[in-house]
Every structure is written in structure tokens, then in C-alpha cells.
Amino acid sequence: MGELHFFLGIDVKRTPNDFFLSQERYIDDLLDRAGMSSCHSAATPVDAKGKLSADGDAITDAKSYRSLVGALQYLTVTWPDIAFAVQQTCLFMHDPRAPHMALLKRILRHIKGTPTHGIQLRATADLNITAYSDADWAGCPDTRHSTSGFCVFLGDSLVSWSSKRQPTVSRSSAEAEYRALANAAAECIWLRQLLGELHCPVSKATVAYCDNISAVYMSSNPIHHKRTKHIELDIHFVRERVQVGEFRVLHVPTHL
């Protein structure tokens, strides 16, 4: 069949040392569906200061909104930059309002200006797994739920990322950050198992970086028991993995 160049809307550019995955043709089709082929571009996909709520005027074409949001979800396969913004639009698919449509159009305007963005996967013998996690504590103005985010690198290649609202309200920023860290740990453990099945076992401990000192301490010992005893047991497996030597949690300053 020859070398892979295009598969399920994903363009693959090969060099001797890497793959570059992008969805430029898919973006053109998506903008054409939305009637925004000639729109002006936006520098960023979302306003970092604004918080979406369920308020606002109802839109007339909710079906089109859901269709475009679903298409954007597939675009995050090669575009981690818009993962958080797309996740925000997904929260309101049941009852989209005018502010949600405005965010959707801003995302489309952003990808209009940067259609060649994508993911580069480099050839390397380095099988070390590194993760970064963060949380937006009580970021939802309606439910006060936090949003977890993480990204995982295999060597120097980004291989996994996520932006997801947490299922319960966190009583502190440390709890929200610890939940995000647990999500990153689960992804890293799965990746280690997958590499083992492919006969590429990872011998070194996975390193996860977090910008919350309390979450880093909780991963090594159950300090402040009165403050953490209400947290569900299922996310305390992070500490267990640290104790067996498979996982290390280190602090990284927020500005980095």
C-alpha cells in the first residue's frame, strides 16, 4: 500500500526522523460547513479571563452547534491547543446559548489563522514518560466544579492530553490539583502497560510535574489527614505508585 500520507482526515508528512500529523484539509471542510471560510483569524481560541455559564439568549440552530462541536472534538486529535476551549463548548451541548456560540466561532476563527498546526512525533530511543498536570479550581461559575488538564510526553513527543471537568466539587485548590494529578497518573500507568505489551518496558519512574506544593506532598505521605480524609480513595493510588517506585511527583513553579 506504500507509505501513509492521509488517513481519516489526518495528513501525515514523513521525514527520516519524524512524523508530522495535521488536519489542514479537514479544517477547510469544517470552515466551509460553518460558513466561515473567509472569516478573520483570532490569535487565541478562548478568552483566558472569561468563564462560561449557562446564561444567555437561546440560539435558533442548536443542531448546527452540536454538529460543529462534534467536528471540533475530532480536530483535537492533532491539535492540543484547543482542547480546553472545545471542552468548554461541549459542556453546553444540551442547551447552547449565545455566549457558547460566540466561543465556538472564536475557535473556528483561531484555526482559520493557523491551519498548519499539528503534532510532531520524533524518532527517539528515549522511552521516559513525563507528565504535566494542572487544575482550574472552582472554575465553573454555575456548579463550582474544577477543570483538570494534563499532557503526557514519551521522550520529547507529546502523545496524550486531556481537558475535563471534575465530577465533584473540590474544597481546596490542593484537592483539585491532586485530582488532576491522579488523572495524569492513570494515563501514565496505562501507557507504561501498553509499552510493556509492545516489548518496550519502561525501567525508569514516570515523572509528573505539578504547580501545587500541597498536592506534591500528598502524593508522598498523607499529611493534613483532617483536610484530606474526605477525598475519595480511588485517587489515592498516586501515593501507592510513588511508594513502589513507578511514579515521582515534582513541583514546577506556575510561571514555568
Image (cartoon, grey):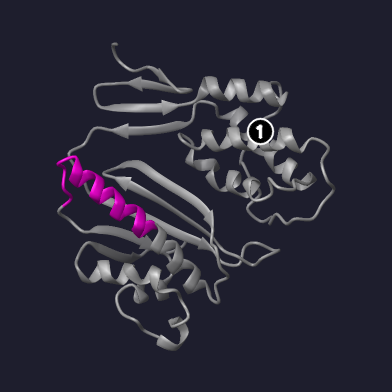
Q: Is residue 5 left or right of residue 127?
A: right
Above or below, 108 against 38 in this view is below
Locate residue 78, reporting x and y percent.
45, 34
Residue span colored magenta: 184-202
Q: Nearer the viewer, residue 52 or 112?
A: 52
98, 20: nearer the viewer: 98
Provide the residue designation for mark 1. 67
Say which quadrant the C terminus sits in: bottom left
Q: Residue furthest bottom?
A: 226
Which x, y percent locates residue 207? 28, 59
Q: Residue at x 64, y 67 (%)?
A: 144
Q: How many marks?
A: 1
Q: Position of residue 166 (x, y in %)?
A: 53, 62
Task: Identify the element where label 1 is drawn.
Answer: helix
Residue visible at 68% across and 39% down in the picture = 104
Crowdedness near tag 1: few (<14), some (14–19) or many (≥20) residues, C-alpha within 10 Å: few
In the image, residue 185 lies in the stretch drawn in magenta: yes
